[in-house]
């Protein structure tokens, strides 16, 4: 039996349009062969089926091939942030000719006497944008931005230092006893259409292959792969507690964080900030961004099979509450912003709420009910957290404070 979800108008109180609230979600607790799932063991057996559907129809499959990765520490500064942190920059080479690589920037709290739990996330503009610290290497890669002093001809200038510092409260993170690791997502693949061969994907091609097959990865899959390689490094760094790493991302990088967390159970906690369509939001609501809109504006993000679902949300073999459920039993946090209707805050909430059915199988608690909370009122005292922040599409100090509090419950 399919689960019919009919929501009350109260559930959409903060939105300005009346959304379509009559849709049928693919049921979480029924296997592909139609058997009801009643236990955590039953879910664990079914879980690979769900993951395979996301691979086949949404993000594309990440190549199984393992390539050798060589990590080289480029710099270490033990007196960063006025002595509060150690800054490391580590390059991961993906090919012998050193043509393919990504640069990781890490800040680790000093004097804690133990390996640090850490937040790992990709950034949009180059590592140097996250803090004004002049020791950060300026990315030489292509960036989407072109306007203003910070970027000229799609490349960062000296003036880009710290321009996104508001999104990365490094001092606060360090003060709370956490480390931070970040990578420019363009190190893995430029965020533009027809960019797949300008990223790391060709390293995985079979002889004669010129692009991924329709069920193989797009940019989100490539970016998520980079997070996995970052995790490989973190496991080797004695200053990091790799068992307490939270993967975090905003917007398209929130979609990426969810997909990374779904595929790689080493991420102990997963945070989706305003991830919207193709992230946490229920696509069958057809509210804000839709599959057609996202595939048209960003044809390189998902696998080619996903395009078959343009205007056919109801036929997609999955919906995104199942993506959140793939994180179970690990803690997950989903956040929205009140003016970010394009990301469908209500759809993001509902996804996180529905995923609770799977957490329940592990005797874990999800979100309280079908009605989203009011702004700036975090909810979820169990393994699923949610808030809707007052304001627009962004990740701000308020959001981070909630993530730090949430992480404290599991990591401290
Ligand atoms: C666009 C896109 C969203 C995405 C966002 C972002 O608005 O339509 O899907 O999440 O960019 O990454 O900021």
Image (cartoon, grey):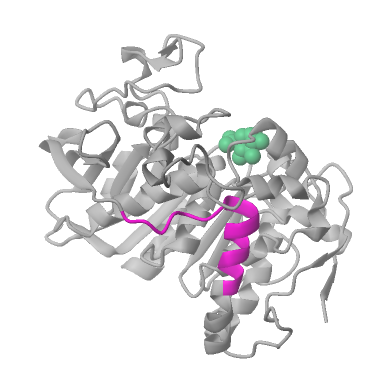
- Horizontally, residue 345 falls left or right of residue 179, namely right
Q: Position of residue 132 (x, y in %)?
A: 29, 25
Q: Position of residue 213 (x, y in %)?
A: 57, 47
Q: Nearer the viewer, residue 258 or 131?
A: 258
In the displayed structure, 123 sits above or below 177; it is above
Work out whether residue 393 can be spotted.
Answer: no
Q: Nearer the viewer, residue 188 or 281?
A: 188
Classify the position of ligand 1 by quadrant: top left, top right, bottom left or bottom right: top right
Q: Nearer the viewer, residue 352 or 69?
A: 69
Residue in view at x 65 percent, y 56 percent: 57
Residue in view at x 39 percent, y 38 percent: 200
Work out whether residue 144 can be spotted.
Answer: yes
Q: Is residue 123 magenta?
A: no
Q: Position of residue 92 (x, y in %)?
A: 24, 42
- The magenta segment is 49-66
Q: Which quadrant: the N terminus?
A: bottom right
Q: How many marks?
A: 0
Q: Position of residue 329 (x, y in %)?
A: 49, 75
In the displayed structure, 54 sits above or below 128; it is below
Residue in view at x 70 percent, y 88 percent: 36
Residue at the outermost front position: 208
Q: Nearer the viewer, residue 268 or 411?
A: 268
Majority secondary structure of the magenta segment? helix
Residue in view at x 46 percent, y 41 percent: 397
- Horizontally, residue 383 falls left or right of residue 379, namely left
Q: Quadrant of residue 103?
A: top left
Q: Which quadrant: the C terminus?
A: bottom left
- Horizontally, residue 26 falls left or right of residue 196, namely right
Q: Is residue 56 magenta?
A: yes
- Horizontally, residue 58 falls left or right of residue 289, namely left
């Amino acid at each position: 039996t399919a689960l019919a979800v009919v929501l009350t108008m109260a559930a959409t109180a903060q939105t300005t349009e009346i959304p379509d609230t009559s849709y049928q979600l693919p049921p979480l607790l029924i296997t592909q062969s139609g058997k009801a799932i009643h236990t955590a063991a039953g879910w664990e057996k079914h879980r690979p089926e769900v993951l395979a559907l996301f691979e086949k129809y949404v993000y594309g499959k990440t190549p199984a091939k393992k390539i050798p990765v060589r990590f080289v520490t480029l710099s270490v500064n033990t007196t960063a942030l006025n002595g509060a942190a150690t800054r490391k920059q580590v390059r991961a080479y993906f090919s012998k000719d050193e043509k393919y690589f990504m640069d990781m920037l890490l800040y680790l709290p000093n004097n804690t006497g133990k390996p640090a739990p850490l937040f790992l996330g990709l950034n949009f503009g180059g590592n140097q944008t996250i803090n004004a610290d002049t020791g950060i290497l300026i990315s030489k890669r292509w960036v989407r931005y072109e306007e203003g002093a910070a970027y000229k001809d799609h490349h960062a200038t000296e003036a880009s230092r710290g321009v996104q510092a508001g999104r990365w409260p490094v001092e606060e993170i360090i003060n709370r006893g956490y480390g931070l690791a970040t990578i420019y997502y363009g190190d893995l693949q430029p965020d533009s259409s027809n960019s797949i061969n300008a990223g790391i994907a060709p390293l995985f091609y079979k002889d004669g292959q010129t692009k991924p097959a329709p069920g193989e990865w797009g940019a989100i899959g490539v970016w998520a792969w980079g997070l996995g390689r970052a995790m490989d490094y973190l496991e080797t760094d004695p200053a990091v507690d790799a068992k307490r790493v939270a993967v975090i991302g905003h917007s398209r990088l929130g979609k990426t964080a969810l997909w990374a967390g779904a595929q790689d159970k080493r991420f102990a906690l997963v945070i989706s900030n305003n991830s919207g369509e193709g992230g946490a939001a229920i696509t069958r609501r057809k509210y804000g961004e839709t599959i057609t809109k996202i595939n048209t504006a960003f044809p390189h993000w998902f696998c080619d099979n996903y395009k078959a679902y343009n205007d056919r949300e109801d036929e997609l073999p999955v919906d995104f509450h199942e993506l959140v459920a793939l994180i179970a039993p690990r803690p997950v946090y989903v956040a929205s912003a009140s003016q970010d209707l394009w990301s469908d805050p209500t759809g993001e909430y509902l996804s996180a709420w529905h995923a609770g059915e799977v957490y329940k199988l592990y005797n874990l608690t999800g979100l309280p009910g079908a009605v989203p909370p009011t702004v700036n009122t975090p909810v979820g005292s169990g393994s699923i957290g949610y808030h809707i922040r007052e304001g627009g599409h962004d990740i701000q100090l308020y959001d981070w404070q909630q993530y730090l509090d949430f992480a404290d419950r599991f990591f401290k």
